[in-house]
Image (cartoon, helix red, strand yellow):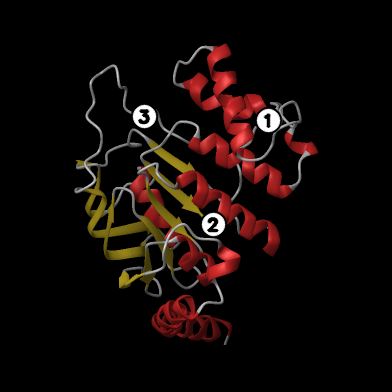
Amino acid sequence: MTSPGPSAEAGTAPANPSNPAIELRGVTKRFPSRDGGDYTAARDMTLTVRQGEFVSVVGPTGCGKSTSLSMISGLAPASGGEVIVQGVPVTGIPDGLGYMFQQDAVLPWRSVLDNVAAGPRYRGTGKKEARELAGEWVLKVGLGGFERYYPHQLSGGMRKRVALAQTLINEPSILLMDEPFSALDVQTREHMQDLLLDLWSGTGAAVVFVTHDLTEAIALADTVVVMTAAPATSKNVITVNLERPRRVEEIRLTESFLAVYREVWESLRQEVEITRARGAGNVA
Protein backbone atom coordinates (compact mmCIF):
# COMPACT_ATOMS: atom_id res chain seq x y z
CA MET A 1 0.00 0.00 0.00
CA THR A 2 1.34 3.44 -0.88
CA SER A 3 -0.50 6.69 -0.30
CA PRO A 4 -0.16 9.45 -2.87
CA GLY A 5 3.06 11.35 -2.34
CA PRO A 6 3.39 15.12 -2.24
CA SER A 7 3.04 16.72 -5.64
CA ALA A 8 6.14 18.48 -6.95
CA GLU A 9 3.85 20.65 -9.08
CA ALA A 10 2.13 21.88 -5.94
CA GLY A 11 5.47 23.22 -4.70
CA THR A 12 5.66 20.96 -1.65
CA ALA A 13 9.02 21.33 0.06
CA PRO A 14 11.04 18.14 0.52
CA ALA A 15 11.29 16.63 3.99
CA ASN A 16 14.01 18.20 6.14
CA PRO A 17 16.52 15.46 7.09
CA SER A 18 17.26 17.24 10.38
CA ASN A 19 13.63 16.94 11.53
CA PRO A 20 12.02 13.73 12.78
CA ALA A 21 10.05 11.92 10.09
CA ILE A 22 8.00 10.04 12.68
CA GLU A 23 7.27 10.77 16.32
CA LEU A 24 5.18 8.87 18.84
CA ARG A 25 4.78 10.95 21.97
CA GLY A 26 3.34 9.08 24.95
CA VAL A 27 1.01 7.12 22.70
CA THR A 28 -1.58 4.71 24.06
CA LYS A 29 -3.84 2.40 22.05
CA ARG A 30 -6.88 0.65 23.49
CA PHE A 31 -9.23 -1.81 21.78
CA PRO A 32 -12.69 -2.91 22.93
CA SER A 33 -12.60 -6.31 24.64
CA ARG A 34 -15.23 -9.05 24.58
CA ASP A 35 -16.28 -8.36 28.16
CA GLY A 36 -17.22 -4.80 27.30
CA GLY A 37 -14.07 -3.29 28.69
CA ASP A 38 -10.86 -2.19 27.01
CA TYR A 39 -7.66 -4.00 26.10
CA THR A 40 -4.56 -1.81 26.16
CA ALA A 41 -2.18 -2.82 23.36
CA ALA A 42 0.27 0.07 23.80
CA ARG A 43 0.87 2.43 26.69
CA ASP A 44 2.95 5.61 26.80
CA MET A 45 4.88 4.53 23.72
CA THR A 46 7.64 6.85 22.55
CA LEU A 47 9.46 6.55 19.23
CA THR A 48 11.46 8.94 17.05
CA VAL A 49 12.60 8.10 13.51
CA ARG A 50 14.72 10.56 11.55
CA GLN A 51 14.36 11.04 7.80
CA GLY A 52 16.61 8.50 6.08
CA GLU A 53 16.89 6.32 9.19
CA PHE A 54 16.14 2.58 9.18
CA VAL A 55 14.58 1.50 12.49
CA SER A 56 13.78 -2.10 13.36
CA VAL A 57 11.21 -2.83 16.06
CA VAL A 58 11.43 -6.09 18.02
CA GLY A 59 9.47 -7.42 20.96
CA PRO A 60 7.78 -10.56 22.29
CA THR A 61 4.85 -12.08 20.43
CA GLY A 62 1.63 -10.13 20.83
CA CYS A 63 3.24 -7.10 22.45
CA GLY A 64 1.80 -4.56 20.00
CA LYS A 65 4.60 -4.02 17.48
CA SER A 66 2.22 -4.02 14.52
CA THR A 67 -0.10 -1.70 16.41
CA SER A 68 2.62 0.96 16.32
CA LEU A 69 2.65 0.76 12.50
CA SER A 70 -1.13 1.00 12.37
CA MET A 71 -1.04 4.20 14.41
CA ILE A 72 1.72 5.74 12.30
CA SER A 73 -0.21 4.92 9.12
CA GLY A 74 -3.46 6.33 10.47
CA LEU A 75 -5.25 3.01 9.99
CA ALA A 76 -5.80 2.68 13.75
CA PRO A 77 -5.92 6.11 15.46
CA ALA A 78 -4.18 6.39 18.80
CA SER A 79 -6.37 6.46 21.91
CA GLY A 80 -4.05 8.93 23.62
CA GLY A 81 -0.82 10.81 23.05
CA GLU A 82 0.43 12.23 19.77
CA VAL A 83 1.42 10.56 16.49
CA ILE A 84 3.25 12.99 14.20
CA VAL A 85 4.48 12.29 10.67
CA GLN A 86 6.54 14.90 8.80
CA GLY A 87 5.66 17.43 11.49
CA VAL A 88 1.90 16.97 11.09
CA PRO A 89 -0.42 15.16 13.55
CA VAL A 90 -1.80 11.99 11.97
CA THR A 91 -5.54 12.20 11.30
CA GLY A 92 -5.62 9.92 8.24
CA ILE A 93 -3.16 8.14 5.98
CA PRO A 94 -0.17 10.51 5.59
CA ASP A 95 0.95 11.53 2.12
CA GLY A 96 3.99 9.73 0.78
CA LEU A 97 3.60 6.69 3.02
CA GLY A 98 4.27 3.14 1.83
CA TYR A 99 3.12 0.09 3.80
CA MET A 100 4.30 -3.46 3.09
CA PHE A 101 2.31 -6.08 4.99
CA GLN A 102 3.15 -9.63 6.02
CA GLN A 103 0.63 -10.82 3.43
CA ASP A 104 1.40 -9.36 0.02
CA ALA A 105 -1.24 -7.24 -1.68
CA VAL A 106 -0.71 -8.42 -5.27
CA LEU A 107 -3.93 -8.65 -7.26
CA PRO A 108 -4.42 -12.16 -8.71
CA TRP A 109 -6.18 -10.96 -11.87
CA ARG A 110 -3.35 -8.60 -12.84
CA SER A 111 0.01 -9.42 -14.38
CA VAL A 112 3.27 -8.59 -12.65
CA LEU A 113 3.63 -5.44 -14.76
CA ASP A 114 0.09 -4.21 -14.12
CA ASN A 115 0.36 -4.95 -10.39
CA VAL A 116 3.44 -2.75 -10.16
CA ALA A 117 1.86 -0.05 -12.36
CA ALA A 118 -1.26 0.13 -10.17
CA GLY A 119 0.20 2.72 -7.78
CA PRO A 120 1.17 5.29 -10.41
CA ARG A 121 -2.16 4.74 -12.18
CA TYR A 122 -3.98 5.42 -8.91
CA ARG A 123 -2.04 8.68 -8.58
CA GLY A 124 -3.18 9.80 -12.04
CA THR A 125 -0.23 8.77 -14.20
CA GLY A 126 -1.19 7.81 -17.75
CA LYS A 127 -1.32 4.11 -18.60
CA LYS A 128 1.64 4.11 -20.98
CA GLU A 129 3.89 6.10 -18.64
CA ALA A 130 2.85 4.00 -15.63
CA ARG A 131 3.64 0.76 -17.43
CA GLU A 132 7.01 2.08 -18.60
CA LEU A 133 7.87 3.06 -15.02
CA ALA A 134 6.61 -0.30 -13.77
CA GLY A 135 8.83 -2.05 -16.30
CA GLU A 136 11.86 -0.29 -14.83
CA TRP A 137 10.91 -1.42 -11.32
CA VAL A 138 10.28 -4.98 -12.45
CA LEU A 139 13.88 -5.02 -13.64
CA LYS A 140 15.12 -3.42 -10.41
CA VAL A 141 13.64 -6.24 -8.33
CA GLY A 142 15.05 -8.90 -10.64
CA LEU A 143 11.87 -10.01 -12.41
CA GLY A 144 12.82 -9.17 -15.98
CA GLY A 145 11.08 -11.63 -18.29
CA PHE A 146 8.17 -12.19 -15.88
CA GLU A 147 6.22 -9.03 -16.72
CA ARG A 148 3.27 -10.95 -18.17
CA TYR A 149 3.13 -13.62 -15.50
CA TYR A 150 0.29 -13.73 -12.97
CA PRO A 151 0.73 -14.12 -9.20
CA HIS A 152 -0.31 -17.79 -9.16
CA GLN A 153 2.59 -18.51 -11.54
CA LEU A 154 5.19 -17.05 -9.17
CA SER A 155 7.10 -18.42 -6.19
CA GLY A 156 6.68 -16.84 -2.76
CA GLY A 157 9.94 -14.96 -3.14
CA MET A 158 8.95 -13.63 -6.55
CA ARG A 159 5.60 -12.40 -5.19
CA LYS A 160 7.50 -10.55 -2.47
CA ARG A 161 9.61 -8.86 -5.14
CA VAL A 162 6.41 -7.74 -6.86
CA ALA A 163 5.09 -6.40 -3.54
CA LEU A 164 8.37 -4.56 -2.92
CA ALA A 165 8.24 -2.96 -6.36
CA GLN A 166 4.57 -2.03 -5.78
CA THR A 167 5.56 -0.26 -2.57
CA LEU A 168 8.70 1.52 -3.77
CA ILE A 169 7.57 2.64 -7.23
CA ASN A 170 5.83 5.68 -5.71
CA GLU A 171 9.05 6.70 -3.92
CA PRO A 172 7.57 6.88 -0.41
CA SER A 173 9.24 9.15 2.10
CA ILE A 174 7.95 6.93 4.93
CA LEU A 175 8.14 3.14 4.58
CA LEU A 176 6.38 0.85 7.07
CA MET A 177 7.13 -2.88 6.87
CA ASP A 178 5.32 -5.47 9.00
CA GLU A 179 7.29 -8.75 8.93
CA PRO A 180 7.28 -8.69 5.11
CA PHE A 181 9.74 -11.58 4.67
CA SER A 182 8.66 -13.87 7.53
CA ALA A 183 7.09 -16.54 5.30
CA LEU A 184 10.19 -17.02 3.14
CA ASP A 185 12.91 -19.66 3.45
CA VAL A 186 16.24 -18.54 4.89
CA GLN A 187 18.10 -18.14 1.58
CA THR A 188 15.29 -16.26 -0.13
CA ARG A 189 14.80 -14.12 2.96
CA GLU A 190 18.45 -13.04 3.01
CA HIS A 191 18.27 -12.23 -0.69
CA MET A 192 15.19 -10.06 -0.12
CA GLN A 193 16.92 -8.29 2.78
CA ASP A 194 19.90 -7.43 0.56
CA LEU A 195 17.56 -6.31 -2.23
CA LEU A 196 15.67 -4.05 0.17
CA LEU A 197 18.91 -2.46 1.39
CA ASP A 198 20.07 -1.87 -2.19
CA LEU A 199 16.79 -0.25 -3.24
CA TRP A 200 16.39 1.82 -0.05
CA SER A 201 19.98 3.13 -0.05
CA GLY A 202 20.11 6.76 -1.10
CA THR A 203 16.34 7.28 -1.18
CA GLY A 204 16.19 9.24 2.07
CA ALA A 205 13.10 7.30 3.14
CA ALA A 206 12.49 6.70 6.84
CA VAL A 207 11.81 3.01 7.49
CA VAL A 208 10.09 1.30 10.42
CA PHE A 209 10.54 -2.47 10.09
CA VAL A 210 8.75 -4.85 12.47
CA THR A 211 10.24 -8.33 12.83
CA HIS A 212 10.65 -11.26 15.23
CA ASP A 213 14.04 -12.13 13.71
CA LEU A 214 16.89 -10.44 15.58
CA THR A 215 19.40 -11.20 12.82
CA GLU A 216 17.13 -9.48 10.30
CA ALA A 217 16.47 -6.56 12.64
CA ILE A 218 20.16 -5.84 13.24
CA ALA A 219 21.41 -6.54 9.72
CA LEU A 220 19.01 -4.02 8.19
CA ALA A 221 18.79 -1.25 10.75
CA ASP A 222 20.55 1.85 11.99
CA THR A 223 18.61 1.54 15.24
CA VAL A 224 16.81 -1.33 16.98
CA VAL A 225 13.91 -0.48 19.31
CA VAL A 226 13.05 -3.14 21.89
CA MET A 227 9.43 -3.21 23.04
CA THR A 228 8.19 -4.50 26.39
CA ALA A 229 5.70 -7.31 26.90
CA ALA A 230 2.14 -6.10 26.34
CA PRO A 231 1.03 -3.43 26.73
CA ALA A 232 3.89 -2.29 24.51
CA THR A 233 6.11 0.59 25.36
CA SER A 234 9.63 1.43 24.21
CA LYS A 235 12.09 -0.28 26.56
CA ASN A 236 15.44 0.25 24.90
CA VAL A 237 16.90 1.97 21.83
CA ILE A 238 20.10 0.37 20.55
CA THR A 239 22.33 1.90 17.88
CA VAL A 240 23.70 -0.48 15.23
CA ASN A 241 27.22 0.70 14.43
CA LEU A 242 27.78 -1.42 11.34
CA GLU A 243 29.11 0.13 8.16
CA ARG A 244 27.01 0.42 5.03
CA PRO A 245 26.65 -0.91 2.40
CA ARG A 246 25.94 -4.28 4.01
CA ARG A 247 25.46 -7.87 2.89
CA VAL A 248 23.48 -9.89 5.41
CA GLU A 249 25.35 -13.15 4.92
CA GLU A 250 28.68 -11.36 5.30
CA ILE A 251 28.05 -9.34 8.47
CA ARG A 252 25.96 -11.69 10.60
CA LEU A 253 28.95 -13.67 11.86
CA THR A 254 31.25 -10.72 12.52
CA GLU A 255 32.15 -9.85 16.10
CA SER A 256 30.63 -6.37 15.77
CA PHE A 257 27.33 -7.88 14.70
CA LEU A 258 27.36 -10.47 17.49
CA ALA A 259 28.04 -7.77 20.08
CA VAL A 260 24.92 -5.89 19.01
CA TYR A 261 22.95 -9.15 18.89
CA ARG A 262 23.89 -9.94 22.49
CA GLU A 263 22.87 -6.45 23.62
CA VAL A 264 19.50 -6.64 21.88
CA TRP A 265 18.79 -10.16 23.11
CA GLU A 266 19.69 -9.32 26.71
CA SER A 267 17.13 -6.50 26.63
CA LEU A 268 14.50 -8.59 24.85
CA ARG A 269 14.99 -11.82 26.82
CA GLN A 270 13.31 -10.52 29.96
CA GLU A 271 10.22 -9.46 28.01
CA VAL A 272 10.01 -12.83 26.25
CA GLU A 273 10.15 -14.57 29.64
CA ILE A 274 7.33 -12.36 30.96
CA THR A 275 5.20 -13.23 27.92
CA ARG A 276 5.92 -16.95 28.31
CA ALA A 277 5.05 -16.85 32.00
CA ARG A 278 1.73 -15.20 31.21
CA GLY A 279 1.00 -17.87 28.61
CA ALA A 280 1.82 -20.66 31.04
CA GLY A 281 -0.44 -19.06 33.63
CA ASN A 282 -3.32 -18.94 31.16
CA VAL A 283 -2.82 -22.60 30.25
CA ALA A 284 -2.76 -23.57 33.91
Q: Residue at x 24, y 53 (%)?
A: 23
Q: Nearer the viewer, mark 3 or mark 2?
A: 3
Q: Report the residue marked by disc 2.
A: 179
119 versus 34 height, above or below = above
Q: Report the residue marked by disc 3.
A: 5
Q: Report the residue marked by disc 1.
A: 112
Q: Residue at x 43, y 81 (%)?
A: 259
| Label 2, residues with CA under 10 Å away: few <14, some 14-19, many ≥20 | some
Q: Quadrant for residue 232, please give it.
A: bottom left
Q: Residue at x 50, y 52 (%)?
A: 197
Q: Nearer the viewer, residue 70 or 118?
A: 118
Q: Is residue 38 left or right of residue 11?
A: right
93 versus 192 height, above or below = above
Q: Measure the alpha-carbon separation of dots 3 and 2.
A: 23 Å
Q: Nearer the viewer, residue 77 or 245?
A: 245
Q: How many numbered discs? A: 3
Inspect the image, locate mark 3, and give the three-letter code of the amino acid beneath it.
Gly
